[in-house]
Amino acid sequence: MARFNQDWRSKLVLLLVLPFTAVGVVVHALTWWTQTPAVVLETLGPSALLALAAWKLRTATPAAAATGAIITASLMFSTYVYPYHPWNTALIPVLVVLFLTSFSTRFGRHKKERLGTAERHRGRSAPQVAANLGVAALLLEPTIQSRLIDSHIFSPPASAPMLIFALGLAALAEAAADTVSSEIGQVLGGQPRMITTLRRVDPGTDGGITLAGTLAGVTAAGVVAAAGCVALRGDLLLFAISWAGGVFGLFFDSLLGATLERAGWLNNDGVNFLSTGSAAVFALAILTFMPHVG
């Protein structure tokens, strides 16, 4: 029964993300094809190559690679800044997230295997990819962007599209921070402590944190935020907000692990999905209380 519940929760995350992003990619592709076909080729091509590389390197299953390709294409279409170039989209921070998470997962693998906490060799599953990247893709879809702009959170309106990128970038920063913190902490962090009580717990325990892992996660969030800021041609404000959101989500992830996940209400995919969402919400809260932005 526990196994069924875990699978059910993971599939729910995938169901929340994949249909919406897939439809968005089709709509974007058809729209751009009638105007500038090169944009479609320069988006779908790199997304497909990234998926192929993830599959060949065994960092993702075939289904996960396909899911990642769809989400990456969605993010690229949603973050283009005229004139369109693939390297001036969310492709760059997605690549950084992939590199950081893959490196940290492989780092010290022998020790993780001894501890029994090593990730399976087949790589990440489709729900795991959706849980880590899905929130960013959903938030940056033009329909949701327009609703956020119409809500008059941002001032002046002309600054809104770039600042909304901070929400998605914060979610991507948290996705990297969470994995890097956990994987590096297991190797270099020593005995972890529960975030809610600070009591010592075994490595791999939900909600357990280490100083080394936390610092690694905070650094990873900053790297992703910086990469996204450069790619999207943002400013220091975009960097600061997305980094802050990523760091907040990192601690929120541990809190969910120590409470709802340990109680059996959530599984890891659910925790990751909500944690990336919390990063975006925190970034949104910062923007909400900064009426002078822009």
Image: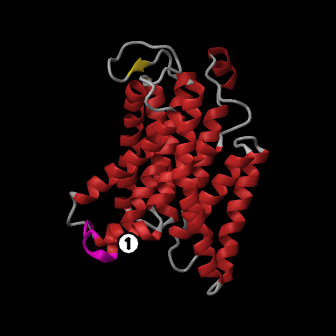
Say which of 273 and 105 sits in front: 273
Q: Does the magenta stretch include residue 83?
A: no
Which x, y percent locates residue 87? 60, 66
Residue that appears at 39% across and 53% down:
242
Image quadrant in which you'd find residue 211: top left
Q: Can residue 140 be seen in this view?
A: yes
User: What type of secondary structure mainly makes up the magenta span?
Assistant: loop
Q: Residue furthest bottom?
A: 35
User: In terms of secondary structure, where does tag 1 sit?
Assistant: helix
Residue that appears at 44% across and 46% down:
276
Q: In this view, does 138 lie above or below 184?
A: below
Residue that appears at 70% across and 43% down:
60
Quadrant position of the C terminus in the picture: bottom left
**In the picture provided, is 244 more to the left or to the right than 293?**
right
**In the picture provided, is 288 more to the left or to the right than 220?**
left
For disc 1, the marked residue is 146
Which x, y percent locates residue 280? 38, 52
Q: How crowded is mark 1: few (under 14 residues within 10 Å), some or many (20 or more)?
A: some
Image quadrant in which you'd find residue 93: bottom right
Residue that appears at 63% across and 78% down:
30
Residue range of the region highlighted in magenta in the rendering = 151-158
- Name the amino acid, label 1: Ser
